[in-house]
Image (cartoon, rainbow, N blue to C red):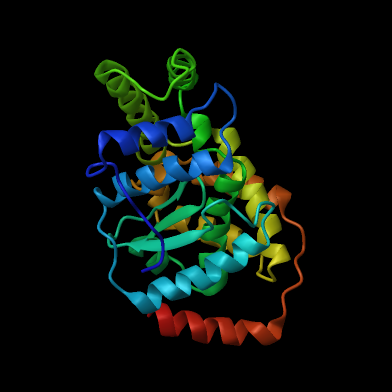
């Protein structure tokens, strides 16, 4: 299966303590390695909410398209690499876990009409990872709390109360990211910035940047703009569409590849 999702439910206290130490060494921007630990836990939390689709062919295809976008992004290499998986739900949504894990729903894939539109959705999520929007949701107080606790112990031995505090702070950080992805959504500026970067990534990878505009416009016309899923946690579709149009620059699309991509899309998705 593509993507690795490991939660904390069966990890012993010693392992949790080590993860917490690696994740929160100081109240500073997290490193790629630290994002990886957070991202795995967030991915596990998402998979406890949405089941993973057991379709190797579709999962492989989504990884092919996603990896193509990731390679042409501003941050093509992450500590744990990029991993893409499909969630078995008709909800129209996609989630970018810190560090490189991207989960897209079957409903979102079905809403896409061709590979370029699917690539547009994945490019938006890759942009969130490039911009480190996920870890930005972690409350600074949590980072400061762990850094302070670790600094008080020269030796790597903690009392049960201190271990409990480390675990609580780590899990709280995961909660912060999860709530942002599923409940609250990112800020408007983060979403607009992700759209802008997505247009650049699409152009670099040889996809049609206009696919993002077409996809958003269709969602709006179909009334999805006021529905749940991605529309619950993203700015109004009309606002995003207008900004995408303003940022759009002509892209060079190899017409010889259009038919190939359509056949590939139909084979994997339909």
Q: If the image is split into quadrants, where does the N terminus sit?
A: bottom left
How many labels sit on residues? 0
State the residue at coordinates (50%, 35%).
135
Q: Residue 179, how many percent across, how many down?
A: 36, 34
Residue nearest the viewer, comparing 188 with 224: 188
The answer to whether any part of residue 46 appears in the image is yes
Q: Is residue 3 above or below residue 138?
A: below
Q: Residue 39, how many percent across, how many down?
A: 43, 45
Q: Residue 74, how many percent across, how many down?
A: 69, 52
Q: Is residue 120 left or right of residue 9?
A: right
Displayed quadrant of residue 158: top left
Q: Is residue 66 above or below residue 135?
A: below
The answer to whether any part of residue 236 appears in the image is no
Residue nearest the viewer, comparing 32 with 186: 32
Q: Is residue 72 left or right of residue 27?
A: right
State the residue at coordinates (39%, 47%).
40
Q: Is residue 110 above or below residue 241?
A: below
Q: Residue 42, how many percent across, how many down?
A: 37, 43
Residue nearest the viewer, comparing 2 with 231: 2
Q: Is residue 253 left or right of residue 269?
A: right
Residue nearest the viewer, comparing 206 with 9: 9
State the residue at coordinates (60%, 34%).
189
Q: If the image is split into quadrants, where does the C terminus sit?
A: bottom left
Which residue appears farthest toward the front when viewing the image? 155
């Amino acid at each position: 299966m593509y993507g690795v999702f490991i939660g904390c439910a069966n990890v012993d206290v010693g392992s949790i303590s080590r993860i917490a130490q690696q994740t929160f060494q100081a109240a500073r921007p997290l490193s790629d390695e630290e994002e990886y630990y957070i991202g795995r836990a967030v991915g596990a939390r998402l998979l406890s909410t949405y089941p993973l689709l057991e379709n190797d062919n579709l999962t492989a295809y989504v990884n092919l398209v996603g990896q193509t976008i990731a390679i042409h992004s501003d941050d093509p290499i992450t500590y744990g690499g990029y991993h893409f998986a499909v969630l078995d739900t008709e909800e129209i949504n996609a989630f970018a876990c810190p560090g490189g894990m991207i989960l897209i729903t079957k409903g979102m894939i079905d809403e896409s009409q061709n590979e370029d539109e699917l690539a547009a959705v994945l490019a938006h999520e890759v942009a969130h990872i490039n911009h480190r929007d996920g870890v930005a949701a972690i409350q600074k107080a949590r980072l400061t709390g762990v850094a302070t606790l670790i600094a008080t112990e020269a030796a790597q031995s903690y009392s049960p109360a201190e271990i409990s505090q480390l675990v609580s702070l780590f899990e709280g950080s995961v909660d912060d990211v999860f709530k942002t992805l599923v409940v609250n959504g990112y800020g408007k500026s983060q979403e607009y910035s992700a759209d802008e970067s997505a247009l650049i990534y699409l152009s670099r990878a040889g996809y049609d940047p206009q696919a993002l505009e077409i996809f958003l416009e269709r969602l709006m016309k179909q009334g999805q703009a006021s529905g749940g899923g991605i529309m619950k946690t993203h700015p109004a579709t009309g606002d995003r569409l207008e900004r995408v149009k303003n940022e759009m620059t002509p892209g060079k699309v190899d017409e010889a590849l259009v038919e190939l991509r359509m056949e590939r899309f139909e084979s994997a998705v339909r």
